[in-house]
């Protein structure tokens, strides 16, 4: 009898990631979902407000993609890893989608330069040669478009290959 394959999905509780998890479960794979929040709040993210049947087959892990020590133990059995994390806007727009925030104020917050929980990143094209694109260690903590969509995939890929980040 063949051993069950294991898939780790970074961002497995998001729109695309949850579909990847479901597809793997249908193919009888063991599935581990890694995200900041772990298992989704089904009251907010499912149509009927209940946990779907397929979610029972997923191991939900809350971890920080930028801190490999928080998820590496879960990857020891993974045969494959999928990265489906990403941001559309640097401001958190999900409260608007959930009906918790007025769409107008949500749009204002999404497009303003300050006051956002996820501040806009500096335009690297405005920098002079030799300038540091990331100004401070504080900027490394901000979830900007580049940090989530580019850097998280790089960190996750290097850590799953056993490479040390410099």
Image: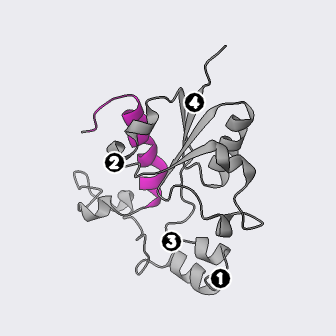
For this orientation, the residue located farthest to the top is 1
Assign a secondary structure to mark 3. Answer: loop
Q: Earlier in the sequence, mark 4 or mark 2?
A: 4
Residue matched to label 3: 91
C-alpha separation, residue under disc 3 versus residue under disc 4: 34 Å
Q: Which residue is mark 1?
A: 103
* For the residues bearing labels 4 and 1, Cβ distance under 8 angstroms: no
Q: Residues within 10 Å of mark 4 (few under 14, many from 20)?
A: many
Q: Nearer the viewer, mark 4 or mark 2?
A: 4
The alpha-carbon separation of the residues under discs 4 and 1 comes to: 40 Å
- Which residue is more in the foreground, 132 or 43? 43
How far apart are the alpha carbons under marks 3 and 1?
A: 13 Å
Residue name at image x 28 percent, y 38 percent: 165
Whether residue 160 is in magenta: the answer is yes
- In front: 38, or 66? 38
Q: Which residue is mark 4?
A: 6
Closer to viewer: mark 3 or mark 4: 4
Quarter where residue 87 is shown:
bottom right
Residue 34 percent coordinates (x, y): 50, 47
Judging by the rendered image, the residue that carries numbered circle 2 is 67
- If you read the primary sequence from the N terminus, does the residue marked by circle 4 or circle 1 appear first? 4
In-front residue for pair 112/144:
144
Q: For marks 2 and 1, give the CA distance.
A: 34 Å
Residue drawn at the location 43% of the way across and 35% of the way down: 157
Chain-order first, disc 3 or disc 2? 2
Q: CA distance from mark 3 to mark 2?
A: 22 Å
């Amino acid at each position: 009898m063949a051993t069950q394959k294991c898939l780790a999905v970074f961002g497995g509780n998001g729109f695309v990631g949850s579909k990847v998890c479901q597809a793997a479960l249908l193919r009888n794979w063991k599935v581990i979902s890694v995200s900041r929040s772990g298992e989704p709040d089904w009251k907010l993210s499912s149509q009927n407000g209940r946990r779907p049947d397929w979610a029972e087959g997923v191991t939900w892990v809350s971890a920080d993609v930028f801190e490999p020590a928080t998820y590496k133990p879960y990857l020891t059995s993974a045969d494959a890893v999928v990265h489906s994390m990403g941001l559309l806007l640097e401001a958190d727009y999900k409260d608007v989608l959930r009906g918790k925030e007025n769409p107008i104020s949500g749009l204002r917050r999404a497009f303003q330069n300050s006051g956002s929980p996820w501040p806009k990143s500096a335009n690297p094209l405005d920098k002079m040669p030799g300038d540091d694109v990331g100004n401070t260690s504080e900027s490394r903590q901000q979830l900007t478009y580049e940090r989530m969509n580019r850097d998280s995939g790089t960190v996750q890929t290097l850590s799953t290959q056993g490479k040390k980040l410099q």
